[in-house]
Amino acid sequence: MSADPARWHSSTSSGGNRMEFKNFSLYINQTKVNRFAGELAAGKLMSTLCKKCGRQYYPPQADCPSCMGSEMEWKELKAEGKLVTFTRIYVPPEHFAVRQPLMPFSSVQFEPCPIGLIRVEKGLTIMGWIPKVDIKKIRIGMKMKASPFTLPDGKITIVLEPI
Amino acid sequence: MKKVAIVGIGHGKFGIRSDACLRELVFEAVKACLEDAGIALKEVDSMVTGVAGDEFSFGIQPSAQVHDYIGFYPKPNFRVEGACATGSVALRTGWMNIVSGLADVVLVVGVEKMTEVPTSMATEIMGRAGDSIWEYPFGTTFPGYYAMIANAHMAEYGTTEEQLAMVAVKNHHYGCLNPYAQMQKEITLDKALTSFTVAHPLKLFDCSLITDGAAAVLLASEEKAMAISKKPVWVAGLGCATDAMRMGDRKSLTSLQASLEAARTAYKMAGVGPSDIDIATVHDCFTIAEIVAYEDLGFCEKGEGGKLIEAKETYAEGRIPVNVDGGLKSKGHPLGATGVSMAIEITKQLRGEAGPRQVKEPEIGLTHNVGGSGQVALIHIFRRE
């Protein structure tokens, strides 16, 4: 990456697959870190690292508020850690509700699967769906890993699984 | 620093107000507020309007809808926003208006018209008050964020679903005594515990309501306050603090750092501590939020919030009465109006005008209002003398 905003476009499209960011974010498509979506589609969970002060960001940021630097490099995250918290949302927002043809990881349209947060290296946290564990068996502190997942409609997301 | 007092209060009826639009709701509250203060609108110098969501107000300038309809122009008015803490942001801004010397008498209005859109859409709009890029893709909703706080609190401190339900039982009890409340219905512990799950472990009765409503207060400088009101209620301390957008970036999931910091600032400014507070309205958007607020405000030790409600210490007769107006839980939660409504309840209590829910001779009251899933918190401390 470069500090020169004019070079962002070329640098972001050069890494990973070309992928619309909104295939991950659902609403927002225009960001300096849109390479994240391409890398996710290619199977990698990427963070950014500030070249000046070394602070690491997940979710990736194009700018570093610690030193006000904007020269970042991409770094794959070691996406393993302990579950910090979780829930299962039974009343989903409109976007995920019944009119949507696909409800990720759910046989019943009205019931999305659980979601959770894991804490990985450097205290960073990753949010993801927990498709394979019954809500009653999810325990805070359980060891889990985060991985990219491509849904049948081409959208990309992140899942958490016990290890 | 200049002293500022609340000299007028006006509370509209909260509920599913399919009979009225945003500007009409405001008119009700402003009319009542001016009647309470006993002055005319022409004596007001300036105005602040709190509205949280453009998607709810169907326009990008809700403040104009309001100053037009109440006939306030050409005097100053603008809109402020702080998600669910919008009403307290408006009050703080009104206070700043007077302390700066720009105005002596300021009308503070909070309003939200939430039921014009379907519930699923309202859920989506509020869900986007989390991180719309990095959290929303996982289907997060407002109950979802607080459910994650609840699960963390239960795992760390042994807080139980029964204790959460006890908050709902209390707030519904007091909602019945508040004629402006949306849901005036007692509930039993069993009913709360057997209601359907909205976001594990939070059930229907753990959640506040989707509400239309408006509230208004009139603020005045010391000289004007003494002239206008026989019972001015003084703003003694203010605190405002912020925290990370994403829950995963927060220092703790079992307390709100913004609440802790805002409380520290407000207590210091007012020169009081938690044990001096005689009555409080706290941000019970979900039952777990009230329990966390007990702890963050210092009404009990960290992790003891569940036990505090279990011992009924936050009932009107208890050690520290909390949300005896029904809270967001039963009174309703029209986002922009909530913070103003909280200040109205404290004013009524300090004036001794709270009727059947009056607490015995309170002198110092506190409001605690949180925006989003904890991104911003505002605390105000009020005194009778």
Image (cartoon, rainbow, N blue to C red):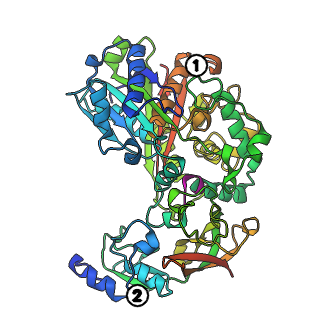
- Main SS of residues in magenta: helix
Q: Could you classify mark 2 by the number of other residues whose Cα lies within 10 Å: few (under 14), some (14-19), or many (20 or more)?
A: some
Residue B264 x/y as whole percent: 50, 43
For image coordinates 30% across by 27% down, the residue present is: B69
Residue B152 left/right relative to B336 = right
- Kind of element beneath mark 2: loop
**Of the numbered discs in the image, which one, if any, rests on residue A17?**
2
**Of the numbered discs in the image, which one, if any, rests on residue B354?**
1
Residue A114 x/y as whole percent: 65, 66
Camera sees residue B97: yes
Question: The residue under label 2 is which amino acid type?
Answer: Asn
Distance, label 1 to label 2, CA atoms, is 64 Å
Which chain does the residue under circle 2 lie in? A
Residue A8 x/y as whole percent: 27, 80
For image coordinates 52% across by 30% down, the residue present is: B14
Q: Quadrant of residue B26?
A: top left
Which chain does the residue under circle 1 lie in? B
For image coordinates 44% across by 29% down, the residue present is: B215
Figure check: B134 above or below B361:
below
The verdict on residue B78 being magenta is no
Residue B133 left/right relative to B318 = left
